[in-house]
Amino acid sequence: MDRIYLDNNATTIVDPRVKEAMDPFFCRQYGNPNSLHSFGTEVHPAMRLAMDRLYSGIGADDQDDIIINGCACEGNNHVLQGIWFGRVRGDARNEILTTQVEHPCVRNTCAFLESLGAKVTYMPVNADGVVDAETLRRHIHPDRTALVSVMWANNETGLVFPIQELAEICRENGVLFHSDAVQAVGKLPLDVSRTPVDFLTFSAHKFHGPKGVGGLFIRKGVPLPPLLHGGEQMGGKRAGTINVPYLVGMGLAMELAVDNLAFEKSEVRRLRDRLEDAILAVPDTLVVGKRELRTPNTILASFRGIEGEAMIWDLNSGGLAASTGSACASESLEPNPTFVAMGIDKELAHTGIRFSLSRFTTAEEIDRAAVLIRRSAERLRAISSTYTGGH
Amino acid sequence: MAKNDLIGGSLWEQYSAKVSERMNDPRHRGEISEEEARSLGARLVVADWGAESCGDAVRLYWAVDPKTDRILLARFKSFGCGTAIASSDMMAELSVGKTVDEAMKITNIEVEKSLRDIDGTPAIPPQKMHCSVMAYDVIKKAASIYKGVDIATLAEEDIVCECARVSLRTIQDVIRINDLKTVEEITQYTKAGAFCKSCIRPGGHEKRRHYLVDILRDTRAGMEKERLLVQADAGDFQSKNLIQKHRAIETALDEKVRPMLAADGGSLEIVDIRESRGTAGEPGTVSVYIRYLGACRGCISSTRGTLQFIENMLRQELDKTIRVIPL
């Protein structure tokens, strides 16, 4: 039986066209692009094409930088640590503003900076699960805020943050703005020529590119010291030999993702809604966040009386891959911070299950998934000591 | 952290086949009704433990023969992960056929061992061990209901680490006996803190009454006090600390020296006491710096016979490494 992959917010299948485009750069054109000889220079056209695709994919100007790095986690570390080491330390503007629902790679980097003496404020989300303009206005202080960092879309809920507004507020106040767009690329149109972000980070493997490569957009003229020191690669802003095949793959993956945005908005959304309707047809379930406020591919569902990990165990036995932010599954054993921040019932903090689709998801898979979900909900509720409904 | 920990995501791979089977098809799932219990001539006991908000909850049903206290039938329901469900199932199974008192001796460790495929290979990964603790707690609860007593009266020991069932007393004892100085050592000796890690310090998965860091600190503080008292009472001058040495010297002076000096209208006071640590084979010395008072000041004997007398007296009374230096 074919397995069904509904964990695309964790990682995605590499588009076969991407893999094919990468292939020549392993055994044939394997030169180091910094070399002066022909092995080095012959990879430049493909790299230029990839860079063109990345720049055009997010609307970057040729004068801006897109630093090719290992992943969005690296990019986020680069921005936060770079701002701390290069700007904040010893400056009157020493506060970093972020949210309570960032990915651990932002949250834990902030915690690290706090241990070095940084002042970090974690803004709460509103009832819709996002940080709104009003909240940012309340927290931002041009005389003391150095950087605002807000994710474009949340990995757990898919909720999309009002980045346009937030970025404009930062611009008005002369404060730098960073957005972790790892869950937005390929799901939402991004255009940094319209949205005044100073830094933007993404990872190729979230949009059908390979794992281990990402990008960091830095607006023209915004200074940021390197995170990795070494050679002159990436204009000295990120040392380390450029991963040519992965850059080539990410470039094509970006182009394909952007080409498929309309498909994402209509078809992926249609399948997502179909699955969501099937989930909500199971009694005593809920889905976090309004549909129109989410990325088109994400559902964070809660099945009352069912512990999240028990359900993904069941679904996995049936060949369906989903994920849980619930306490039991992670080693930290902490309740889902997004749930906590959104003020969702403590009971539900252990029942969350995330289903995330991609453009490779089929209607047939969604229908099979719906059956597996219903069956698991029935089985686990039959042995649940806390589920009282449905009788 | 090492090779085996660096990849991650292997939680389920560490489950035994028995855990998987019992998660997929728990043998003792379900309820026992009043009628079913009555038809067995048994008393129905229903016990709840945990809460959804904690991530784990279990309800245990027992049909207990009131004449023999024997558990005839056991079933459970659970809100929990695979480990919680599988261990509840095994716990129910282990309790059948036992008396209530015997069942109370079932621990999560026994449940975990019964779920192993191979002796010596844990049935679940360490961070899942706390999910099996509930199986133990709910038995206690059921027993207290059956006996009609408060559950607190059934707690024989003050448990610090629920996962490994290590009591406060055990932890205090190993710290003392083995002179343990770190939490890591406590974990090595007792397994306390090796599993869900909640009991190591505040801020973990769940709030605990005792934390290893506090127990270590308090026990070591207690040990240090005892050490000082032992030292103070020690007859052996060398083992005393400086203050205690000072006190012993003053006492000896008061008893054996000052009365003699006073007879001639003199006295002395201690200005300083300095210790030099000995080396291997070479004992340290204790130098007592004194100042003569009254008639002793300027007395010719004070640097010869009297001095010799004082030093000999202290050496005889206390320790032969004492030197007396007049200022």
Image (tube, rainbow, N blue to C red):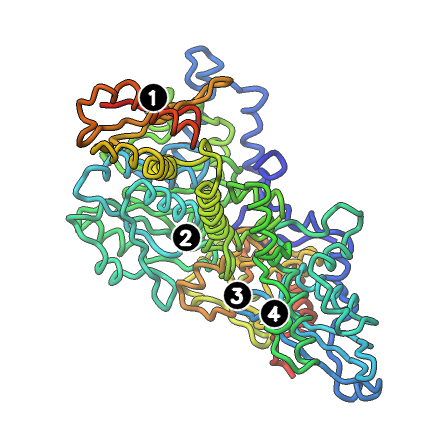
Q: Is residue B205 left or right of residue A294?
A: right
Instruction: Name the kind of residue labelled 1 in the image.
Output: Gln
Q: Chain of mark 3?
A: A
Circle 3: element type: helix
Q: Does any portion of residue B25 appear in the rendered image?
A: yes
Dot in front, 4 or 2 = 4
What distance separates the C-alpha of mark 2 from that of mark 3?
A: 17 Å
Name the subunit of mark 4: B
Kindly identify which residue carries mark 2: A188
Q: Chain of mark 1?
A: B
What SS does tag 1 mark? helix
Nearest to the observer: residue B308 or residue B6:
B308
Query: What whole-number distance in Å separates the C-alpha atoms at marks 3 and 1?
Result: 102 Å
Q: Is residue A97 left or right of residue A261?
A: left
Q: Earlier in the sequence, mark 2 or mark 3?
A: 2
Q: Which residue is mark 1?
A: B308
Which residue is rendered at x = 31% and y = 29% of the image?
B273
Q: Identify the image quadrant of the N terminus of chain A.
A: bottom right
Q: Nearer the viewer, residue B3 or A241?
A: B3
Task: Residue lying at the far front in this picture: please name it.
Answer: B263
Which amino acid type is marked by label 3? Asp
Amino acid on which the number 2 mark rests in the picture: Leu
State the quadrant of the C terminus of chain A: bottom right
- Quarter of the image where one finds residue B264: top left
Q: Compared with residue B170, is residue A373 higher up or lower down, i.e. above or below?
A: below
Residue B306, percent from left and from top: 29, 24
Task: Specify whether residue A271 is in view.
Answer: no
In which quarter of the view is residue B130 placed? bottom right
Asked if residue A356 is positioned above or below residue B327 in the image, the reply reads below
Q: Which residue is mark 3?
A: A273
Crowdedness of circle 3 by 10 Å Cα count: few (<14), some, many (20+)?
Answer: some
Secondary element under disc 2, as helix, strand or loop, is loop
